[in-house]
Amino acid sequence: MKTLLVIISALFFSINFGIAQETPTNSLLWEVTGKKVKSPSYIFGTMHLIPNDDFLFPETLKDKVKASDILVMEIGGLGEQMKAMKLMMLDSGTMFDYFTEEQLDSIFTYTKENLGFEEAQMRMAFGKMKPFVLLQLFTKDAFGENPQSYEMSLEKIAKANEIEVLGLETIEEQMGFIDNLSSDDQVNMIMEALRSGDDGEEEMRKLIDIYLSQDINKIHSFAVNSDVSSPEFEEDFLNNRNKNWIAPIKKIIKKNKAFIAVGAAHLGGPNGVIELLKAEGYTLTPAKL
């Protein structure tokens, strides 16, 4: 279950730093050249949240960002993300109207035992928000204390080096994908997250290990084959968004040396960003971190 939560909210080393010089066959970092691009650009697959102990951000990666003219992410920087709070609010009623009394008992028990929130605190803090907020709350808890964010780290470097930050989609568009989930789907996802218990933690560890292996096709496969994934999820959250990103990416890399960072689940698979750019005539080469 929590595999899906990472993808949505948010995705993705025993990375081998050995001295071998051969080009890696798997990588989270890909160089984009060809088709009259001004300079090589790079595409990096992120995990939106990752435990602090697993966060690996080598100088190689930092240097690629610093050498870029522009940083491109799914959402165009923290300014866009600040709009998210308003978009997470319900127009009427409360979040807890979506659940049965039995489901609410399970939610309040979980949040008290795992997050330290009493029922009254939950109702006050989250009552006016959309149910999906609970998924984000549970996801962050699964990553332990002080989880790291690649997006925030990348934006910090960009800001320090006066590099422009752009987004491939707006926060309204991204939240729209979430709003398109039916209320029943959201409730089922939340309750499945609560039921998963230790199994959920094991699945999260598997996801992190696959991410650290840098095998983008395995990351994609793990995402779309999670228990609560579906053909509709794959089409809406991955394939359609990937296709929508290609036109702006082409426009950006034509004139800029860009560093592009998106969730790693978007890179692999037959309809992933890497294959879609290859189909457009670009040369995609895995780069060594």
Image (cartoon, rainbow, N blue to C red):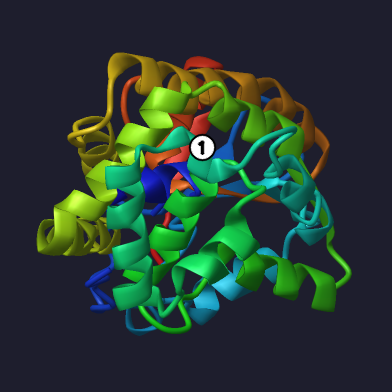
Going 53% across and 26% down the picture, which residue do you hit? 242
Total marks placed: 1
Q: Residue 134: x, y in percent?
A: 47, 52
Q: Which residue is mark 1?
A: 97
Q: Is residue 19 left or right of residue 156?
A: left
Is residue 25 in sight in this rendering? no
Query: Splitting the image into 4 quarters, where does residue 168 fall?
Result: top right
Return the residue nearer the eye: 144 or 261. Answer: 144
> Would you place residue 118 above or below residue 97 in this image?
below
Going 48% across and 47% down the picture, which residue do you hit? 263
Going 61% across and 52% down the picture, which residue do you hit? 127
Q: Is residue 18 left or right of residue 275?
A: left
Q: Callout 1: few (<14), some (14-19), or many (20+) C-alpha neighbours within 10 Å?
A: few
In the displayed image of the protein, which residue is found farthest to the front? Answer: 101
Q: Is residue 96 left or right of residue 37?
A: left
Going 37% across and 15% down the picture, which residue do you hit? 232
Q: Residue 185: x, y in percent?
A: 38, 26
Q: Quadrant of the N terminus?
A: top left
Q: Is residue 286 left or right of residue 161?
A: left
Q: Amino acid at mark 1?
A: Asp
Of helix, strand and loop, which one carries label 1? helix
Q: Residue 66: x, y in percent?
A: 72, 70
Query: Splitting the image into 4 quarters, where does residue 22 fall?
Result: bottom left
> Would you place residue 155 above or below residue 32 in this image?
below
Q: Residue 157: x, y in percent?
A: 72, 74
Is residue 110 in sight in this rendering? yes
Q: Quadrant of the C terminus?
A: bottom left
